[in-house]
Amino acid sequence: MSVLNTINKDNLPKHLAIIMDGNGRWAKQQGLLRTIGHENGTKSVRITIENCAKLGIENLTLYAFSTENWNRPKLEVETLMKLLIKSLQKELITLQNNNIRLNAIGNLDMMPKSAQKELLEVMEKTKNNTQMTLTLALSYGSREEIVSAVKKIADKVKNNIISIDSIDDSIINKHLYTQNLPDVDLLIRTSGEHRISNFLLWQIAYAELFFSEVMWPDFREEHLYEALISYQKRERRFGKTSEQIK
Ligand code: FPP
């Protein structure tokens, strides 16, 4: 029996999020420029998107560029932006063929105008696709997202649109960039690092975490399946007892 057949299609994460880490180290290990690592990382992006859609995962969120990544060397930032634009142009066909809708979260105003334009175009062209929502986190930082949500809510309280007493989880959810996405069920981070790095802090409250030793440019279907199999073996109790779950 192939590994794929051991995955229970009725128990897939509804929302899978991935911290794609290790592009730079992958390149360094082979004496290559960091930017070559990112280039090879785009291949893993395409393969992972296709595999997730084929499996039936409804929401995939990829951490493509953090607010902190703006502090990287100028050449690296420029390469990442160029790779994003090139990938969006090249992979529109992949998104259409696999019935995938593109979404983006983050402080998108910070992105270069050319990247914003490409994102908007691909989002518009794929807006009616229904198999999977692919969300790219770009110029994204979770604390910034929460601060921005708090400001929007405070403004509504100030203008008597909502009362302080009505503020609950669902109100906060509605003011986050991820307002239309369910909570994360499974978070994968590659490259052997065991950190969250300011990614979806609110949304991973009950997520299962999977840390893969594989560097992102080497991440392939077998590594995705390994994470999903591990996820399916876990008992998600959401604070309840094991007996209550059964
Ligand atoms: C982390 O590796 C990766 C990134 C900061 C960027 C991820 C971008 C891509 C995979 C390519 C473009 C994305 C899309 C969506 C087309 P790192 O540079 O932090 O690696 P290191 O920790 O080994 O230095």
Image: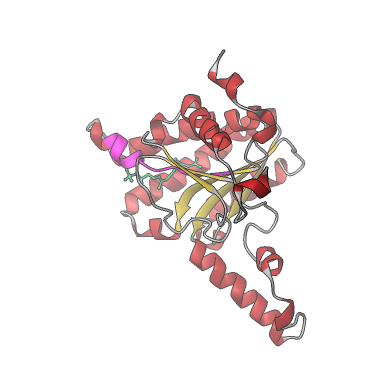
- Name the residue located 75 percent from the left edge and 38 percent from the top edge: 130
Furthest residue in direction front, as rendered: 243
> Which quarter of the picture shows residue 16?
top right
Q: Going by the picture, which residue comes out furthest to the top?
A: 1
Front residue of 237 and 63: 237
Query: How is the rendered protein coloured?
Result: secondary structure
Q: Position of residue 56 (x, y in %)?
A: 67, 32
**Which residue appears at 39% of the width and 43% of the height?**
21
Image height check: is 41 above or below 104?
Answer: above
Is 218 covered by the magenta stretch?
A: no
Q: Would residue 129 be visible to someone looking at this image? A: yes
146 relative position to 126: left or right? left
**Nearest to the observer: residue 243 or residue 118:** 243
> Relative to residue 119, is residue 223 depicted above or below?
above
**Is residue 93 something one can see in this rendering?**
no
Q: Residue at x 70, y 32 (%)?
A: 10
User: Against 44, is 121 above or below?
Assistant: below
Q: Quadrant of the C terminus?
A: top right
Residue 84, placed above or below residue 162: above
What count of labels does the image hold? 0
State the image coordinates of residue 155 (x, y, percent, origin top left).
Answer: 67, 81
Residue 5 x %, y %:
61, 19
Give the residue at x 44% y 60%: 67
Quadrant position of ligand 1: top left
Q: Position of residue 177 (x, y in %)?
A: 62, 60
Quarter holding the N terminus is top right
Q: Which residues are magenta?
A: 16-27
Q: Is residue 174 left or right of residue 60?
A: right
